[in-house]
Amino acid sequence: MSKYWSPIVSRLTPYTPGEQPKLSKLVKLNTNENPYGPSPLALAAIAREVGDSLRLYPNPDAEPLKLAIAEYHAQHGITPAHVFVGNGSDEVLAHAFQALLQHDAPILFPDITYSFYPTYCSLYQVAYRTIPLAADFTLRVDDYLTAGANGGIIFPNPNAPTGCLLPLAEVERLAAAQPDSVVIVDEAYVDFGGDSAIPLVARYPNLLVVQTLSKSRSLAGLRVGFAIGQPDLITALERVKNSFNSYPLDRMAIVGATASIQDQAHFEQTRQAVIASRNTLVAGLQALGFEVLPSAANFVFARHPRHDAAQLAATLRSDGIIVRHFSSERIAQFLRITVGTDAACHTLLDALRIHLQ
Ligand code: PMP
């Protein structure tokens, strides 16, 4: 802390990102990256862009990418005016907090959720109230509807770090019940087993759906995320963006993300491979006595009735396998394990089998 710091900065509790280890030999199952590479078409597009054109500023509106995203969702009435893009969905979410959630009433989100939300609240001075998940870690829409006036609702679907999915009909019930405040659905993991709320956008002017290319498109290093909502909401996000950084996406990100969105075959193939490995991982963990929450994501959340999760994470770390452990009380007995390749899942299961004996 320093006398030069603003009061807001002095009060911030920054987000702690998952470890990005220097050693490449580790089996890295801690930050929900996709084990299969990005689309080869995306890599080729990025390679073509590396050259003299980097002298020039990128398209400030990332137009080709907005077009590709709109085309992908055209059957739901999505046009480029319904699309906002940013430097990872974290940046999209940051803009959404500032543009749409800074109201007098507190915003609502689950007590167990993506830990960036309280961070953005402290950064942007947004009051919030957490709504406890049910005992089975699912989100109950009725608890939000009876919570009283709010300045907006945000939640990941599937939730993080639990992986639990809220059915689309329930998302719709929430959006329909409170037309006067915004409902933001953070769909970072939706492609691994959920139904996106994008088809609802045409009917609900208060609904904003946020997605990322970091997970199902395997482009975490490129930093591209987007939001889909009615033009009224998108205009608010653009106003914040243009007051902050009018070129959020660089030239390589624009062409790489565009090519990735257009490569449906690679997307389908790698998405299905992750889902198949998740089934292997879940079955293997259950056979070892773990309780595994139902996952619609590219990670699973699991606890063992007789073994301490923090200790297991540390033991796995000494075997060269990293998984994520959160120390907050209600989930301290869980490990969050990213779905790796089948080989990586088996390495993890073999190590656990030895340690649990
Ligand atoms: N939302 C959720 C729920 C996440 O888990 C993550 C990944 N940490 C993000 C958003 C952000 O992903 P990115 O910035 O890579 O798009």
Image: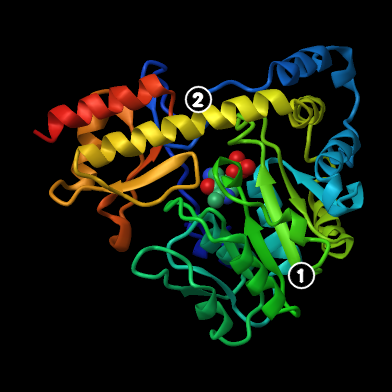
Identify the residue shown where x is 84% and y is 61%.
Answer: 230
Q: Which mark is residue 35?
A: 2
Q: Is residue 331 left or right of residue 105?
A: left
357 and 320: which is toward the camera: 357
Q: Quadrant of residue 182?
A: bottom right
Counting residues from the start of the chain, the first of labels 2 and 1 encountered is 2
Question: Label 2 neighbourhood size at 10 Å, few (<14), some (14-19), many (20+)?
Answer: many
Q: Is residue 288 left or right of residue 272?
A: left
Element under label 1? Answer: loop
Q: Is residue 302 above or below residue 253?
A: below
Element under label 2? Answer: loop
- Which residue type carries mark 1? Asn
Residue 323 makes an appearance in the image: no
- How far across and down, in percent of the image, does residue 173 sit? 64, 73
- How far across and down, in percent of the image, does residue 86 sit? 75, 44
- Which residue type carries mark 2? Pro
Q: Which residue is mark 1?
A: 206
Residue 313 makes an appearance in the image: yes
Q: Quadrant of the C terminus?
A: top left
279 and 19: which is toward the camera: 279
Question: Label 1 neighbourhood size at 10 Å, few (<14), some (14-19), many (20+)?
Answer: many
> From mark 2 to mark 1, how far is it between C-alphas?
35 Å
Q: Is residue 94 left or right of residue 290?
A: right
Q: Quadrant of residue 122?
A: bottom right
